Image (cartoon, rainbow, N blue to C red):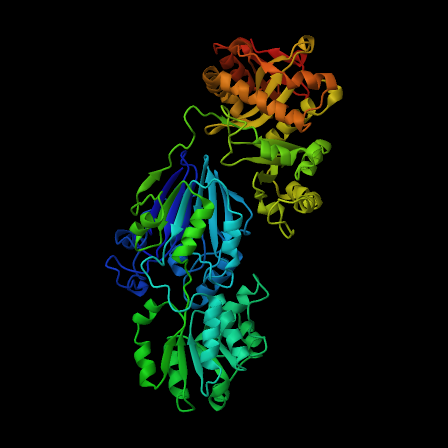
Amino acid sequence: MRLTIHRGTHEIGGSCLELSSNSGCTRLIVDIGLPLVNADRTPFEWDNFRDLTENELLTRRILPLIEGLYEGGKPSVTAVILSHAHLDHYGLLRFVHSDIPMYMSLGTKSLAEVSNVFLGTSVRLDMVKTFTMWQCFQIGEFNVTPYLVDHSAPDAAAFLIEGEGQRVFYTGDFRGHGRKGVLLDRITKDPPANVDYLVMEGSMLGRDEGLYPDENAVEQAIYDLIQHQKGPSYIFTSSQNLDRMVSIYRAARRSGKILVIDLYTAFVLDKLSIISPSIPQFSWEGIRVLFSHYHAGKLAEQDKKLLYKYRRAKIEFEEIYDNAQDKVLIAKDSRYFRIVIGKLKQSSKALAVFSMWHGYLERSDLEQFLQANGIEMTEIHTSGHAYVNQLKRLASALKPRFIIPMHTFYPEKYSEMFPNVIQLKDGEIMEFEIINKPNSVRCRALSKGFMDKLDPAKDGVYGPLVELVRKTKDLHLEFRGQLDLNNPENDLPKYEALNIYYKGNSILKLGGDGTFRIDPAFTEELEIPRFLRTKEDVRAYIDLLPKIMFNVATRGKTSMEIEYEQMIIRANNLERRINSEYIAVYNQYNIGNERWDILAIKWPRRERQKPTGQLALIEVKYALNPEIKIAYEQLERYYTYLQENIEDLCREMELILRQKLVLKLIEKTPEQMRQLEKLKLERDLKKIEIILFLVDYNPNSVWKTKMIEKARELPFAGQIRIVDGGLAMWQQSSKPLA
């Protein structure tokens, strides 16, 4: 895996990170934000650049130089994923090629829709796929698990991204002192295990943490200020900062005052009601909506019905003027609100609260304008970003091998706090080091801890899943372990999982830590548990399985070849009456970019008095699969690997065989089971069988004929056998190629 921070190693804002697989087949962009500052740290003004062409923006480095990302070129990026809806993380999304899918939370998508209406962000949302927090999903060769985090943007996510034996945790923007501070507690109490690289924000490094330590303190300070106020109270804040909106609403209600919001704020809160019932709404008691011509026009362009919807809570300017003492107005530093403030100053003495980052105040003359109108301003704010002690808490819980600074002006300060810091430059490509220990060999068997959870005999939490697979003929379970073959008893895997398949489609990828993934297409409109960690979670999944399987049957990919592979495994492993001479040990064994269909053990009937067997590699070809033309090339590559790795491969298959016997995923007579528990594979390369399993192939096919002619020229042609049709396998049911 390779990591590139295109922007953000030495600045706050403009965040953009790329992760790519070693094969280059998967490229994932995480966030694509507008800069907040120029190279000299003066404020970045998008209006100065908005009319430039894509090439001009690339030349000036406003757009990061990322090949295959933008509309003007050929797309080669697999996907873009967003952490949250702040412009410094998604403001350049409009330039992403229309064929590249985008992933974001439901709340982030809702705010992107709002910004399209009011801010002209022009983000195309037709390629957006929404994810569910804490549920793993797959993008190419990577698995991504989003974690809901506390931040001033709603529905913000951090990401655990896994691939090629590496685990990267990207924090995005987070904190632990907002109204969702418990989310930081949750991650630190139950952190993802074995994180290799922690890409962590440090916005608060070099900054004063301020007078107000958390959101509760902000609420109390606003209440203390406005409770005896005899005139209007103006609070300048972001309508998208839901924690702050809740604080202001609660302070207004406690002081017996009416909260006046504008149409933009009403629309924001309305759109975000989809993520929580606790978000204040225009229809709530104590909230009124002030219409403006500009906002009304924007909403009318979107949907005229919205104007009628919000009209129920409309407040006229005259009502505010006549009773200004009980009004708290959400204000913006805009021409419209400056007119409103100017007109209301005659009613009674007003006060103002600036409840945003102080840097925004420095960029305007708002404070001078308010003073000119006799209005005193007070700053009441707490940061949307993590304090230093919270950065340390997270790093201590995750225990990453390395920490990479991002979203900070002071990356050098990380080394003062942490011993394992890698400081990068924008655009620098970092190749992740191979983390295996010397002489270690990856083994796809499972750890003892995971096996205990799977074993019904030990009342393992996942035992019902194993029993379900054994009883259901259409299901198949496969290990996806990460053990060190040279130390399988003691090595804790960096990541391990099992997959359950139905009709060639994965209906569950379950990690040893209880995280899991199901294709969202199979779980639409279903109440899926967030984790599978308890028996209740497992029971909930099993109860939903008939609906998931129905969705697979109607929406899943048609993969008859893989489905046949699983039928072959079932027939040979779990049909005791057949008494097959082949036992399928592993399905879809990955070697680099290739996957071997089935690795099996041949255990001849006449030699079962001794627990020895031979390795068999089974390549399945279904009907007119065009790969049949070059199957001989595949077999040649496979044989080369066997020559170089026969010892390790045999040891691995022996270990996986024993684990599947424990879980009774292989059915034989009691005596045969005892023999198999001791079985050893012969290490003689010349005794390995390579089987082409041809399902429904026309015996007169030109492709098949030419392939066989080519295969006969291979030096190991005498070890190749052909099976035509059927599922169960005996020596007699296959024939030699030569």
Q: Residue at x 52, y 29 (%)?
A: 490
Q: Is residue 129 visible?
A: no
Q: Position of residue 714 (x, y in %)?
A: 48, 11
Q: How many marks?
A: 0
- The quadrant of the rendering that contains the C terminus is top right
Residue at (41% x, 87% y) in the render:
344
Q: Is residue 266 above or below residue 176?
A: below
**Is residue 559 positioned above or below 236 on the image?**
above
Of 520 and 542, nearer the camera is 542
Residue 436 sits in quarter: top left
Please give left or right for residue 590 compared with residue 96 in the image: right
The one of 602 and 253 positioned closer to us in this rendering? 253
Give the vertical position of 706 relative to 434 (above or below): above
**Residue in view at x 60 percent, y 35 percent:** 499
Name the residue nearer the viewer: 322 or 388: 388
Give percent across and percent down for residue 310.
Answer: 55, 75
Q: In x, y percent, where is residue 656?
A: 59, 25
State left or right for residue 463 relative to residue 157: right
